[in-house]
Amino acid sequence: MPIINRIADFHADMTAWRHHIHENPETAFEEFKTSDFVAEKLTTFGIEVHRGIAGTGLVGVLHGKDGPNGKSIGLRADMDALNMDEGNTFAHASKIPGKMHGCGHDGHTTMLLGAARYLSETRNFSGTVNFIFQPAEEGAGGGRRMVEEGLFDRFPCDMIFGMHNWPDLPPGEMVVKAGPIMAGADQFEIRVAGKGGHAALPHHAIDPVVIAAHIVTATQTIVSRNVSPIESGVISITQIHAGSAYNVIPQEVIMRGTVRALSHEVRDQLENGLRRIVETLPVAFGSSATLTYRRGYPPTVNHEGAPTNLAARVAAELVGADKVYDNVGPSMGAEDFAFMLQERPGCYVWMGQGGAALGCLLHNPAYDFNDEILPLGTSYWAKLVETALPVAA
């Protein structure tokens, strides 16, 4: 199945939309202009628009040839940018200092808008499509908030689908696989209590720096010696803050980091192991420590059966079965589409956009979405709807 001709016809329009969004990046729950832009386009396409879901989120509702008939599908795109400076100097580079579309959400939003335009023109499907434009994916949990605010009560979806561009893959290749595709991501803070003193007289103090060093070492054994070798888990301590002078043993050390896992069972195991070390190891040094553990995004787990099979079938028709991979390992990055997959059956896919020719990874100051794949992603969305909601013969 090649790119749909009608979608190829408005490739230039989609490129212009994408550049506009890229030039005007907005971060978590501040996507006011982006939301206005999306709503204006959807309205122009004749699509029913519902705003104010999770603040700046919105949903476009479109019925097929036979109107609402109880069958429905949800397509989701994220809209937010990152808090980072852009290193590019091309004409559509960010106009907002400290904000950048460094993850391709501008492309995701554009492809879903393109699908909305095409499907509103053709209506070659039966039932209802919900175009879900989500704010605050980058760490702030906009997907969770949309679910909590009744997304699926207001806009029923038999199945839900998401997509992310993937610079590791060349254009024209996709990853569609059942099971975990992205990790769950949690955050923690450890406060190690000490007894401050002169660095030349350590026997009069309790040195929290030494205790913190032992905690760093001990936490590495949680994954290497507690988690099964065939499971995946990560504990990374990424910050250590202590001291104010070269000759003073500090009173306290603050450590922060992240935990990643592909299953809820390993996630629990990592948290429990971290808590055990923090509560017991400092006691051996005559001290104590406290752990603050915050659960973040759960693992993104694609459903077995119909949703993933459907996505794989459409992807194979689009790019060829030999270019659709189900044997690629999951990413330890996180994705809040996971909250939607906990509520409805669905599938989250990766679409190649880079490869050796472009090669700039996500969250890099030199990253830019590849406009050449806009018709490809839009065609995937359109054919996914037409295949999931076929018109009766």
Image (cartoon, rainbow, N blue to C red):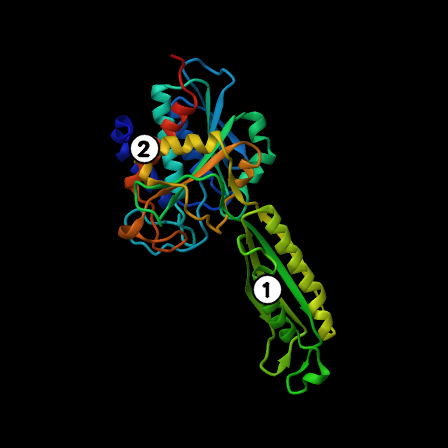
Instruction: Give amino acid for label 1.
Output: Thr
Looking at the image, residue 175 sits to the left or right of residue 158; the answer is left
Q: What SS does tag 1 mark?
A: helix
**Which label was assigned to residue 81?**
none
Q: Nearer the viewer, mark 2 or mark 1?
A: 1
Looking at the image, residue 297 sits to the left or right of residue 172; the answer is right
Kindly tell me whether residue 16 is visible in this rendering: no
Q: Position of residue 188 (x, y in %)?
A: 61, 57
* Tag 2 near tag 1, CB within 8 Å: no
Looking at the image, residue 323 sits to the left or right of residue 388; the answer is left
Looking at the image, residue 299 sits to the left or right of residue 126; the answer is right
Instruction: Give amino acid for label 2.
Output: Leu
Q: Position of residue 29 (x, y in %)?
A: 52, 42
Which residue lies under the disc numbered 2? 318
- Residue occupying image coordinates x 33% and y 53%: 360
Which residue lies under the disc numbered 1? 221
Task: Name the quadrant containing residue 214.
Answer: bottom right
- Residue occupying image coordinates x 59% and y 26%: 153
Q: Between residues 41 and 146, which one lies in front from this camera angle?
A: 146
